[in-house]
Image (cartoon, rainbow, N blue to C red):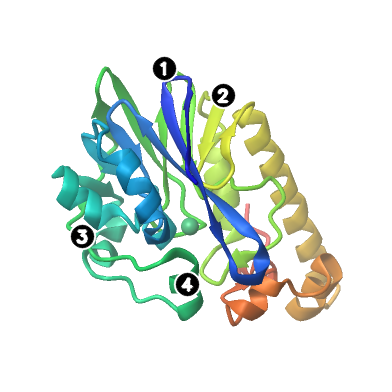
């Protein structure tokens, strides 16, 4: 069941998707000043559609192309006749049906292609403005949306948890660190996260995540300097592989945290 709540002028739609033997994962989409931020996964379509149909939606803004954020974009475009805006870097991907591994189709459902438009530097909303901030690392096209006047920040999958323990193969911890550092120069209070929902003290929580990732990076590099392999470092820091690693055939793994740090070297 999807819960609908109002929070500081943001309508929060919160649902859950069960993940085989892994329990369930929360999913949030947000409606703010006529902008729907993220479209939710296809697997929540039946529950989300009747809630979104009567709402006034002027545009859909995607934080990134992943299917749990874009699964209902094609439907929204058809149903509402509104533009769906994504980072220019995701236009090609979003234009065609996503080809997903079986476990992702099972978790999130299909992601049909749609006709995306490119995001610029900002989105003018009803009586406000959302600044578009490029925050690559989780995905190459990831962006956050900031209303600096109200201090609210829509973070897609940049935050999720302050203590990252597993990432996808294409993710980069050093890039995520760079994105968070840039973001922390902005003024904001509340985070609206696609998996954690409303996060108060957002600036502090994001800073805590940055500290955690920086410490993790130092630890990985130190062990690497001592001659340990990525596999050994992974085992030492994170212990036994998580179930998601097996289910995803390694697309998700704590090892990717280690390898992305080693790949980038000592950095700045
Ligand atoms: Fe994602």
- CA separation, marks 4 and 1? 40 Å
Q: Earlier in the sequence, mark 1 or mark 2?
A: 1
Which label sits in the foreground, 3 or 2? 3
Q: Is residue 261 visible?
A: no
- CA separation, marks 1 and 3? 32 Å
Q: In this view, does 101 lie above or below 261?
A: below
Which label sits in the foreground, 1 or 3? 3
Residue 189: horizontal and vertical position, in percent?
Answer: 56, 24
Which label sits in the foreground, 4 or 1? 4
Q: Earlier in the sequence, mark 1 or mark 3?
A: 3
Which label sits in the foreground, 4 or 2? 4
Callout 1: 10 Å neighbours few (<14), some, many (20+)? few
Q: Which mark is residue 106?
A: 4
Q: Which mark is residue 189?
A: 2
Examine the image and state in which quarter residue 239 appears: bottom right
- CA separation, marks 1 and 2? 11 Å
Return the residue at label 3.
Answer: 114
């Amino acid at each position: 069941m999807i819960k609908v709540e109002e929070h500081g002028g943001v309508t929060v739609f919160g649902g859950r998707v069960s993940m085989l033997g892994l329990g369930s994962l929360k999913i949030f989409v947000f409606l703010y000043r006529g902008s729907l931020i993220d479209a939710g996964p296809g697997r929540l379509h039946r529950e989300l559609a009747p809630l979104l149909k009567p709402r006034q939606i002027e545009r859909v803004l995607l934080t990134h192309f992943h299917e749990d954020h874009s699964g209902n974009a094609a439907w929204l475009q058809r149903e509402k006749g509104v533009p769906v805006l994504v980072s220019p870097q995701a236009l090609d991907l979003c234009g065609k049906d996503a080809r997903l591994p079986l476990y992702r189709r099972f978790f999130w459902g299909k992601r049909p292609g749609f006709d995306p438009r490119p995001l610029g530097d900002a989105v003018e909303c009803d009586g406000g403005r959302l600044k578009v901030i490029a925050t690559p690392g989780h995905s190459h096209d990831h962006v956050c949306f900031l209303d600096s006047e109200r201090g609210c920040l829509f973070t897609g999958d940049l935050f999720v948890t302050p203590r990252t323990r597993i990432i996808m193969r294409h993710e980069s911890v050093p890039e995520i660190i760079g994105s968070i550092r840039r973001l922390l120069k902005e003024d904001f209070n509340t985070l609206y996260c696609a998996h954690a929902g409303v996060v108060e003290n957002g600036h502090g929580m994001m800073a805590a995540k940055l500290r955690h990732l920086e410490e993790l990076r130092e630890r990985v590099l130190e062990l690497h300097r001592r001659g340990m392999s990525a596999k050994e470092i992974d085992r030492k820091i994170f212990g036994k592989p998580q179930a998601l690693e097996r289910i995803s055939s390694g697309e998700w793994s704590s090892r990717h945290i280690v390898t992305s740090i080693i790949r980038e070297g000592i950095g700045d």
